[in-house]
Image (tube, rainbow, N blue to C red):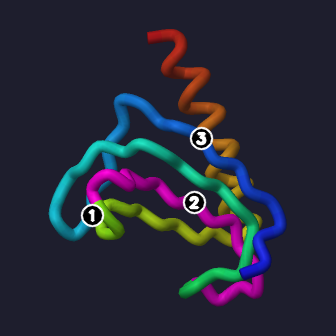
Amino acid sequence: MCTYSTEKFDVTASSGKGPQGWFPLRTATVYYDHPVHAPDEHTVNIDFLNPEEGPAARVAVELSLDSARELLAALQVTVERARNH
């Protein structure tokens, strides 16, 4: 794998849904690399994990650059709106 850029951080009070149902998330990794399934040559990939619960406790996302930009903008708007509640 030739990851170009990686950011990893701890997440708190967060949950993900996998094959076994909901589980608490512990870490998130955001990186730019070759996707496993998406049709683009490179994608922005996000992995939400709980290593304590094994490899099935993972939510993986592969986004085109355009979709990643749109997600970033939507997150910014939502977080700013939430600040006012």
**Quadrant (top left, top right, bottom left, bottom right) of the N terminus:** bottom right
Is residue 49 on the magenta stretch?
yes
Amino acid at dot 1: Gly
**Label 3, residues with CA under 10 Å away: few <14, some 14-19, many ≥20:** few
Residue on which the image places disc 2:
46
**Label 1, residues with CA under 10 Å away: few <14, some 14-19, many ≥20:** few
Amino acid at dot 3: Phe
At 37% across and 51% down in the image, what residue appears? 50
Mark 1, secondary structure of its residue: strand
Q: CA distance from mark 3 to mark 2?
A: 11 Å
Q: Which range of residues does the magenta coloring cover?
A: 38-53
Instruction: Please report contact status of discs 1 and 3: CB closer than 8 Å, yes or no.
Output: no
Q: Percent position (x, y) of residue 34?
A: 71, 81
Which tag, 3 or 2, sits closer to the chain's start? Answer: 3
Report the side of 64 relative to 85 (left or right).
Answer: right
**Label 2, residues with CA under 10 Å away: few <14, some 14-19, many ≥20:** many
For the residue pair 48 and 51, the one nearer the viewer reads as 51
Identify the disc placed on residue 60.
Answer: none
Which tag, 1 or 3, sits closer to the chain's start? Answer: 3
For the residue pair 81 and 33, the one nearer the viewer reads as 33
Q: Which residue ends up furthest to the top in the rendered image?
A: 84
At 62% across and 51% down in the image, what residue appears? 71
Is residue 39 on the magenta stretch?
yes
Residue depth check, mark 1 versus mark 3: number of the one nearer the observer: 3
Q: CA distance from mark 2 to mark 1?
A: 15 Å
Q: Is residue 12 above or below residue 80?
A: below
Which tag, 2 or 1, sits closer to the chain's start? Answer: 1
Residue depth check, mark 3 versus mark 2: number of the one nearer the observer: 3
Residue on which the image places disc 3:
9
